[in-house]
Image: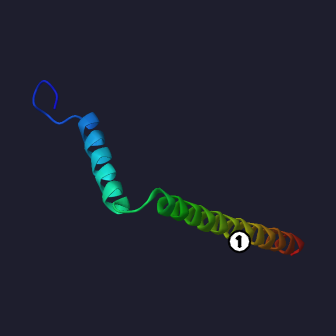
Amino acid sequence: MNARGEDSPEMDDRYREAEHGEHFLSWCHGKTIEELWNSLVCTTRELENTRLVAQEEVRKRDGQVVLLRSSSARR
């Protein structure tokens, strides 16, 4: 709260950070460091795989765009 008793944006940010921290702590409660590490590794691999699939889709779409532009230019 500021001097006038109003909530400030900084307080909102700190509250959200605290909520996030509590959620994280409740999520990892009871897990060992090794379990958390393995979860992080698996999630990282999944994310990397998703990124590679998305990059391949973008390459395919770019190729389709090139073909469409070249075929429309011939008309």
Residue 75 as seen in the image, left or right of residue 33: right
* Quadrant in the rendering for residue 62: bottom right
- Classify residue 14 by image quadrant: top left
Residue drawn at (83%, 73%) of the image: 67
> Taking 72 as reference, is 16 above or below it?
above
Instruction: Left or right? Give the position of 12 relative to 56.
Output: left
Outermost residue, left direction?
5
Q: Quadrant of residue 2?
A: top left
Residue drawn 13% across the image and 34% down it: 6
Quadrant (top left, top right, bottom left, bottom right) of the N terminus = top left
Query: Residue at image x 28%, y 51%?
Result: 19
Q: Position of residue 10 (x, y in %)?
A: 28, 34
The front one of 63 and 43 is 43
**Closer-to-camera residue (27/30):** 30
Q: Is residue 60 left or right of residue 2?
A: right
Quadrant assignment for the C terminus:
bottom right
**In this rendering, would 60 be left or right of 40?**
right
Name the spot of residue 68 as percent of width and height, x first.
80, 73
Q: Position of residue 11 (x, y in %)?
A: 24, 37
Residue 20 vertical placement versus 67 (above, below): above
- Near mark 1 (Cα within 10 A), the count class, few <14, some 14-19 or many ≥20, is few
Kind of residue indicated by mark 1: Glu
Residue 8: percent from left, percent from top:
22, 34
Query: Which residue corresponds to the image point at 65% horizontal and 63% vertical from the top-left?
Result: 48
The residue singled out by tag 1 in the image is 57
Q: Secondary structure at mark 1?
A: helix
Query: Eyeballing the image, is 3 above or below 69?
Result: above
